[in-house]
Image (cartoon, rainbow, N blue to C red):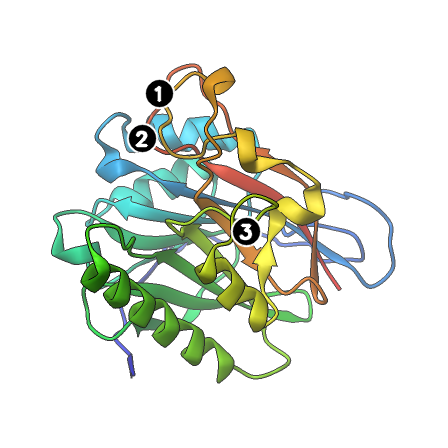
Amino acid sequence: MKMKVMKLITFPICILLFFGCGQSPSGKTENSQEDSILIRVAAYNVQYSKRGTSKEIGEALSEYDLDIVCFSEAPGGDWTKETAKVLGMDHVIVGLYSTAGHVDKYKTIASRTPLYGYEEILMGDTLHTATKALTRIGDKEIAVYSAHFPKGWRDQAHIDETTGKITDFIDQLKKMPAEEVTLVMGDFNFIPTNNDHISMYHDMFMDIGLDVSWKDLQIDVTKRNSSRASDPEEEGKGHVIDHIMYNPTKVRAMDGDIIEMEKPLSDHKPVWALLELE
């Protein structure tokens, strides 16, 4: 089930966006490969800005020259607008529903390019949703989903509830047009399937053709953390649960990583990627 509610914020600042072969929306040439579009994206669970202000978080991300950022556990109101301003972004969407009914845990999107077609994708109910918007870069229309998925852990009933909600989201993705370029970014609350661990939730996404950027980047995340940001990296426990996910036949990660901070600004770390759209 989908519920469409418009809550779109844009700012009346005109910027010139230069789109060309091998160029990002910011106009920076990354390579000269014909018919490719490069964009820089990130996902960050900001823990309702408990440890860092909007300005601090924006400044920490600004060196990556990002084109789109998906925040989870973001405060409501103008928080994303203020962070986007630091990032040089003029287009913001704040989701309607706070995750799990908690205070100030919204899914939001900030972008250099205009956002439109806002939808709140319900996972069975309003407690867990994905905030979706469309943007156009060059000749590509991109569907951006800012997500914060539940984690089943308390007991079998809780696991079954989580499985049902993720299944519902997957079923809705199956209905999207085949030509759609889909980016799902955020706190997935599961580690990817690897040689020592099978994640049924990751496998569900792979079954519909979506996968995590870590594979393209050949980054072994089994000894890294993206949550538990205060843990020393050398004590990594393979707890990478924040992902950038896409269809590898349409999108390829050229660069990216987990962003390490000397002073963590959340209990999660940001993750970023330079994506090539075919």
- Secondary structure beneath disc 1? loop
Give 139 or 259, whichever is nearer the viewer.
Answer: 259
Say if residue 27 shows up in the picture: no
Amino acid on which disc 3 is placed: Thr
* Label whose residue precedes the other's in the sequence (2 or 3): 3
Residue 110 x/y as whole percent: 42, 51
Report how far apart the C-alphas of labels 1 and 3 lie in the structure. 24 Å
Q: Quadrant of the N terminus?
A: bottom left
* Separation of marks 2 and 3 at Cα, in angstroms: 23 Å
Residue 15 drawn above or below residue 209:
above
Q: Is residue 44 left or right of residue 205?
A: left
Asked whether the beta carbons under mark 2 and mark 1 sit within 8 Å of each other, the answer is yes
Instruction: Name which residue lies at 40% across and 41% down.
Output: 44
Which amino acid does the dot numbered 1 rest on? Ser
Quarter of the image with the C terminus in it: bottom right
Does dot 2 land on a helix, a strand or a loop? loop
The circle drawn on residue 193 is 3
Give the residue number, with chain letter if any, for mark 2.
Answer: 267
How many marks overall?
Answer: 3
- The residue carrying pointer 3 sits among few (fewer than 14), some (14 to 19) or many (20 or more) residues within 10 Å by Cα, namely some
Label 2 Cα crowd, 10 Å radius (few <14 / some 14-19 / many 20+): some
| Residue at (68, 65) in percent of width and height | 138
What residue appears at the point 79 percent right and 52 percent down from the top-left corner? 22
Image coordinates of residue 53 in percent, x first then y, are 27, 28
Mark 1, residue position = 230
Q: Amino acid at mark 2?
A: Asp
How far is mark 2 from mark 1, CA to CA? Answer: 7 Å
Name which of mark 1 and mark 3 comes first in the sequence. Answer: 3
Local secondary structure at mark 3: loop
